[in-house]
Amino acid sequence: MKYAIVGFGTAGYHALKAIRTQDPKGEIDVYTNTSMPPYNPMLTTYYAVGKLEYEGMFPFGSLESIQKEFPFELHQEEAIKVHSEEHSVETANGQKEYDRILIATGARAFAPPVKGLKPENAYLMRTVEDAQRLKERLQQGDVKNAIVVGASMVGIKVVEVLQKQGINTWLLDLAPYIFPLAAYPQVAQVIQERVEQQGVHLKFSVTIDHMEEEDGQQIAVLTDGSRIPTDIVGLCIGTRTNTQVVDEKIALGKGIIVDQHMQTNVPGIYAAGDCCEGNNLENGQTQLIGLWANANRQGTTAGNNMAGQEMVYEGNILHNITRFMEMDFIGFGDNRIEGEVLEYGTLGKGMYIRLVLKDHRIAGANILDNCSISGIVKNYMLRLFGGDTGKLPVYQRAALESAGLSSAFLDELEGKIHGCH
Amino acid sequence: MKRYVIDLDMSKCVSCGACTVACMDQNDFVVQDGRRPRRNIFDMEQLEDGKVCFHHLSLGCMHCTDAPCIVGCPSACLSKDPETGMTIYDTTNCIGCHSCAMACPYGVPAFGADGKMTKCDGCYLRIQHGMLPACVKACPFGALQLVDLDDPQQAIPAQHSLRQSSLELLKAQV
């Protein structure tokens, strides 16, 4: 069997591991446009702030050590096209045919151009190079003021890096509040208050209109007309899937659409990780769910199926955990769905959980200041989405109660979900 | 590779706490540090179908075969010990992001004052040297047991086994 893995992030790595385990003799070609081993984009800010060594960004070690453990042929060249009819991968050096192809090209940071923003003052945060650039700039010591555009999970981590360096930092977003894709407005409000208390300036429903220069100082002119002096601009607006490599026969939404075997609509061609749209268990639609664990599961599933095993990955729900500025924010599910609200704790004073219940399920959850209940809450949500009607087993209840949730709250929750008291 | 887990026979536990104390002793836990021990006991009273039910539990890492914490850790700090199959960790690169906590359906991972994760490692070094995990050794009722998953003779009946009764629930975790 001949396999191609196009893109070598964590999804590609997990597929390689699965294929090599199932098929010790198969020929595996890995195409990557970097000279680096798989890295985790989530770790870049930790390197930039000095919490991780450079090597710490590469969880699976060096390319050599990976190659030793799971032998493969490394092609350090850009894959230009995956031709679905010919089952081939095209590079500048020609075209090669394969029995199975995995597209694991990931996603890239996306930022629309800002008029007047000098490239040397614009910073993205996704790649190892992005982290190195920011780290080097901060070491120069010439940054006194900074703006971060995008109140996302990445945006807040960049803000945290800047704020820790004593830089006067602004965080802007066109959305009306922080973490607009995960937080409920009430929870966002408390997070914002805390972030401001730590000295970060926040502004919502605005973005940078253009940049000007005044006496050698860069000035950001915002869409509401206000003017903020800034030395650098962090652009954490969002990501786009890297799907340039697929031809017109492969079904595309915002990403490459895959089934539960991680196969595209073209037999023998698979996709996994941040470039693909897998199943969202909450609504049964395909959706981009850019998560480390999701990419790992998808890569493993793709690899096993490519090597002739039968493996299904049923999907995932939107979820996020972000620890920043001494707080934990956890968001599960679709925060746009409205329903009956059930809360525990006082928002902003210790553990708080807000659940939105709909159709006997937990449509969404926000947790503040308590990570230890998060895994069990997620498990309960997933089981309910999967059609399970069982209550919380005693050992989960015990762990939740020991973490601080009251027995009365859990009774109320189960009563509402299962329709009895 | 052996595939060991520490399982609980829920019909035998009386929440005496010997396991927790043994675990704290083995792992040099200082109570004043404020850390949560790696194994905890629970004594619950619950109204079920109009009747009061009593539950006694000792909970620690279940050392899941396909452990969601290993998949979820962004820094690959968690892994399986090749000799015992226990879920172990090296937190050199732990960033304290709590992704492991979000992945665990048992609420096991805890965090020390340094922000790094800590959890039960199955006493894998003791097992490698022919000893039982400290909690198993200390349990006076044989409720906690070191189980070899590949042994066809399972010592704990399925209906009393914490591990076996939670397998279905684990399937949902992603």
Image (cartoon, helix red, strand yellow):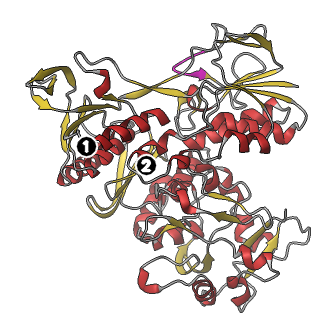
> Disc 2 marks which residue?
A46
How would you classify the magenta stretch by its main secondary structure? loop
| Image position, residue A162 (x, y; %) | 28, 45
For label 1, count other residues whose C-alpha is less than 10 Å away and answer few (under 14), some (14-19) or many (20+).
few
Name the residue rendered at 44%, 58% in the picture.
Answer: A413
> In this rendering, which labeled residue sits more in front, label 2 or label 1?
1
The magenta region covers A252-256
Q: Is residue B109 depicted above or below A206 in this figure?
A: below
Q: Quadrant of the N terminus of chain B?
A: bottom right
| Image position, residue A276 (x, y; %) | 59, 26
Indicate the quadrant where residue B103 lies. Answer: bottom right
Q: Is residue B26 depicted above or below B102 in this figure?
A: below
> Disc 1 marks which residue?
A141
Name the residue rendered at 54%, 65% in the picture.
Answer: B109
Name the residue rendered at 72%, 83% in the picture.
Answer: B136
Q: Which mark is residue A155?
A: none
Q: Is residue B87 depicted above or below A243 in this figure?
A: below
Whether A255 is among the magenta residues is: yes
- The amino acid type, in three-letter code, at marker 1 is Gly
For label 2, count other residues whose C-alpha is less than 10 Å away and answer few (under 14), some (14-19) or many (20+).
many
CA separation, marks 2 and 1?
A: 19 Å
Name the residue rendered at 61%, 15% in the picture.
Answer: A245
Indicate the quadrant where residue B138 lies. Answer: bottom right
| Image position, residue A33 (x, y; %) | 60, 24
Q: Is residue B139 depicted above or below B37 in this figure?
A: below
